[in-house]
Image (tube, rainbow, N blue to C red):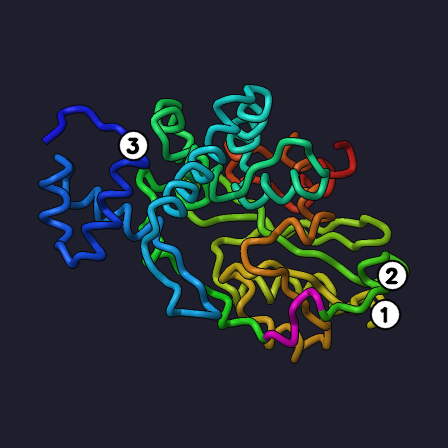
């Protein structure tokens, strides 16, 4: 076995493809190449070609596999080659931005050099990211990332009929008052699950901030109901959320105040850019180091007005 790690090259991929076609097991291929069998399993899992329309074409092809691997490494190398992009990503992670928010903001601002949220996650868990403990600032606060198959999915809790793509154009174009965007502002783990609801009206940019003891959906929705129920219906026409678990009790919100709800695509919080921008400004005076339950409602209002 080799004592130092090196990436599988094209010559090895040719051998893997030939031996797999011949029916040779992964264990024997690993032994022939002097690789650990997990390396070969990972290579086959990551770089096998899949055609959803013509499944008969599925398979491991050496040149295609090599191109897939090179493209994957090239994406991560963007953060190694472009120091200003890397530093911007690091700064935003340290200020509480999630990888999805960072990648979405890059797309929204049409950065000439942009990276996906998956690339940012990989960077955060790479040797460079681990060296400065970026994982501590990610939403999950995990020292090691969950395997892909173990990551939770919440999309089934939100009706496809409420997808943001079905939202009327008057909302997207900011031509009608009364449409809001909502998000939760998170804080350090030492403060438990306490957080602050951030609610922003899209036309006026008027903002409301509400403290929460935890992220349970019913109390979060109760806070929104209390904040909006005294307003005329035309001033609370709709709210756009992301697909966080804290917003899964949206039917309760609709039943109580009749406000229409819309939801961003999965992993696309940038689609509600008004509240995301507001949260970025709020961080100037409400950092992750603040205990949200030590801040009064008056403090939240004063901080926003002064900020």
Could you tell which of marks 2 and 3 lies nearer the N-terminus? 3
Residue 84 spot, x, y in % from top left: 59, 21
Q: Which residue of the protein is positioned furthest toward the right in this rendering?
A: 175
Q: Residues within 10 Å of mark 1 (few under 14, many from 20)?
A: few
Residue placed under numbered mark 3 in the picture: 7
Q: Name the side, left or right, on which 64 lies relative to 40.
A: right
Residue 17 spot, x, y in % from top left: 26, 50
State the residue at coordinates (71%, 38%): 110
Could you tell which of marks 1 and 3 lies nearer the N-terminus? 3
Mark 1 near mark 3, Cβ–Cβ under 8 Å?
no
Q: Residues within 10 Å of mark 3 (few under 14, many from 20)?
A: few
Give the mark toward the camera: 1 or 3. 3
Q: Which one is in front, 177 or 211?
A: 177
Q: Secondary structure at mark 3?
A: loop
Magenta range: 160-165
Measured along the vertical axis of the image, is residue 280 above or below residue 80?
below
Q: Secondary structure at mark 1?
A: helix
Q: Name the side, left or right, on which 164 lies relative to 89.
A: right
| Majority secondary structure of magenta residues | helix
Q: Secondary structure at mark 2?
A: loop
Mark 2 near mark 1, Cβ–Cβ under 8 Å?
yes
Query: Which quadrant does the C terminus fall into?
Result: top right
Which of the labelled discs sits on residue 234, or is there none? 1
State the residue at coordinates (43%, 33%): 123
Q: CA distance from mark 1 to mark 3?
A: 59 Å
Give the mark toward the camera: 2 or 3. 3
For the image, the number of numbered tags is 3
Is residue 284 shown in magenta? no
Which of the labelled discs sits on residue 177, or is there none? 2
State the residue at coordinates (50%, 40%): 187
């Amino acid at each position: 076995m080799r004592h130092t790690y090196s990436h599988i090259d094209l010559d090895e991929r040719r051998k893997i493809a030939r031996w797999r076609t011949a029916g040779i097991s992964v264990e024997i291929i690993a032994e022939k190449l002097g690789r650990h069998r997990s390396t070969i399993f990972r290579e086959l899992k990551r770089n096998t070609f899949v055609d959803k329309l013509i499944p008969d074409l599925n398979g491991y092809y050496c040149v295609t596999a090599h191109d897939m691997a090179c493209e994957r490494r090239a994406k991560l190398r963007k953060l190694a080659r472009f120091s200003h992009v890397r530093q911007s990503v690091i700064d935003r992670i340290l200020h509480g931005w999630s990888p999805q928010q960072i990648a979405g903001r890059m797309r929204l601002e049409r950065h000439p050099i942009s990276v996906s949220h998956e690339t940012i996650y990989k960077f955060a868990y790479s040797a460079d990211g681990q060296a400065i403990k970026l994982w501590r600032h990610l939403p999950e606060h995990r020292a090691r990332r969950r395997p892909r198959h173990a990551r939770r999915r919440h999309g089934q809790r939100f009706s496809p009929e409420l997808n943001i793509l079905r939202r009327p154009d008057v909302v997207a174009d900011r031509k009608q008052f009364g449409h809001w965007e909502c998000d939760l502002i998170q804080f350090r783990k030492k403060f438990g699950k306490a957080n602050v609801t951030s609610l922003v009206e899209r036309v006026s940019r008027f903002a409301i901030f509400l403290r929460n003891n935890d992220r349970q959906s019913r109390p979060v929705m109760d806070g929104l109901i209390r904040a909006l129920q005294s307003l005329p219906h035309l001033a609370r026409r709709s709210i756009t959320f992301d697909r966080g678990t804290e917003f899964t009790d949206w039917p309760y919100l609709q039943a109580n105040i009749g406000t229409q709800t819309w939801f961003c695509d999965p992993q696309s919080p940038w689609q509600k850019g008004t509240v995301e921008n507001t949260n970025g400004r709020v961080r100037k005076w409400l950092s992750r180091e603040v205990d949200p339950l030590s801040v009064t409602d008056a403090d939240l209002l004063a901080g926003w007005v002064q900020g």
